[in-house]
Image (tube, grey):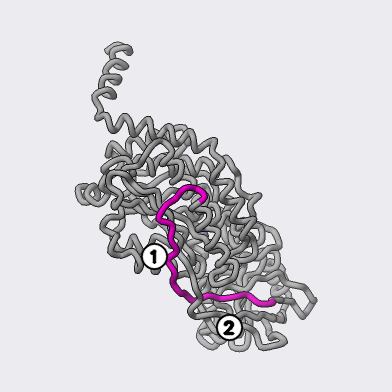
Amino acid sequence: MRMTTIFAAAALAVLAAPAFAQDLVAGAAQVRDRALTDGTAWAVAESLTTEVGPRMTGSPAMERGRDWAVAKFRELGFTNVRVERFTTPAWFRGPESAEVVGPAPHKLHILGLGNSASTPKGGLTAEIALFRSYQELLDQPEGSLKGKIAVVTQRMPRTQDGSSYGFVNAQRTQGPREAARRGAVGYLVRSLSTDDTRLPHTGGAQAAGIPAAALSPPDAELLENLARRGAVRVKLDMQSRSDPKAPAYNIVGEIRGTERPDEVIVLGGHLDSWDPGTGAVDDAAGIAITTAAAKLAASAGPLKRTIRVVMWGSEEQGGSSGAYLAANRAEVPKMIVAGESDSGAGRVYSIALPAGSRSHPAMKAFEAALVPLKVVVRREAPQSGGADIAGLISAGTPFVDFNQDMSRYFDLHHAADDTLDKIDPAELSQNVAVWAAFLYTVANSDIDFRQLAKEAK
Ligand code: ZN
Ligand code: ZN
């Protein structure tokens, strides 16, 4: 066949495709292009980090965050704006300090971990037992750390997909409890950080009844060097309090579908944050991306299905995923698909769609829109969709996973450096374009992810 004939045949095949698929391709491209020059997401991230700032569950800032969310949804034209209240355990940081008292005095840069206990008034001083890997701590017999402050200094490698966080996560989340079980009176862990600044990175941990804090990476290395020389004594002085039933809120806004409004696409990010920074990449970015994407998806005309954006209110300290499922369980069979943006503001580079859906015309239209955004659709279905849609997933909601470049995310995550200036507006817009194209094609088609998954088996 000559080339012209091949082109003619291809053109005929395109013309023969169902009209709705053609409309989906054109519409998805249109909302994508609009998203790339639209400033909504940046404005939302700027507004949240500037006007509200850090937003710990149960804090007065979170109450302001709730009011900000309601006002922002309304300002952007969302309807059915509502607040779903629940209660969840919350921890609140008080004054904290740590220092090496011998052999040479050094101030240590620390941040208490969520659920850390307070030290006795006036602090506690003890010799450290330092382990360069978390496994070394786990290898210690019960009672062997009696009276010591356990220190784990395992490093977190930099990875594009953020997977190293999963490998080292237990040293923060479970380390305090494992140390306490072995008799330790305190716990210090090298921050789950890929940066080398003297900023510690906080985060949640299981309650262990002992004070527990993250060390800045240089301070973890300082303790390694001191420990190599002999006994090291550290003083910890940390105060905190907790509330087993703190008020928390999931805030919801919708763009209602015109033909099948009870069929709902659920997406969102989390409104709460840790306290050292302004919660910009974690997760004002996710709030901004999903809110802007919903608005842009609706910018090319009325949608057939409903898009619902949820600003989940307690991801960091837990509770919002379960509360959202509990309040909306009856609706799950009508939830078409769920997705979450909680990996920062780096560009999307690959996408995992529910099993069996890649070849559906709607997802073909979506995939076509992704080409100029340099995003590929993976062969495999997603493994996990994110902490706040975990409840919906457990109840059988189909879900997607958009993989972002997380190379730099753990330089900033849960640290004082998580601030607005770290968000690249162009990368933020690329995220919005990807989500907007996805929402557009799902909301304007009849794609049934549950049925496609069944057929794929
Ligand atoms: Zn997050
Ligand atoms: Zn986080």
Above or below for 283 versus 236: above
As drawn, is 2 to the left or to the right of 430?
A: left
- Local secondary structure at mark 1: helix
Question: Percent position (x, y) of residue 158?
Answer: 57, 54
Residue sitting nearer the eye, 33 or 197? 33
Residue 119's disc number: none
Magenta span of residues:
75-95
- Residue drawn at x 24%, y 50% is 453
Badge 2 residue CB within 8 Å of ligand 2: no
- Residue drawn at x 31%, y 38% is 362
Question: Percent position (x, y) of residue 199?
Answer: 68, 63
Circle 2: residue type: Ile
Above or below for 409 versus 11: below
Residue sitting nearer the eye, 23 or 388? 23
Which residue is identified by label 1?
A: 324
Quarter occupied by the N terminus: top left
- Residue 364 lies in what quarter of the image? top left
In magenta segment, residue 87:
yes
- Residue drawn at x 58%, y 84% is 184
- Residue drawn at x 54%, y 88% is 143
- Local secondary structure at mark 2: loop
Which of discs 2 and 1 lies nearer the camera? The answer is 1
Callout 2 crowding tier (Cα within 10 Å): few <14, some 14–19, many ≥20: many
Circle 1: residue type: Tyr
Residue 210's disc number: 2
Residue sitting nearer the eye, 355 or 143? 355
Predominant secondary structure, magenta span:
strand
For marks 2 and 1 on the same chain, the one whose residue lies earlier in the sequence? 2
Question: Percent position (x, y) of residue 279?
Answer: 59, 59
Question: Percent position (x, y) of residue 368?
Answer: 38, 33
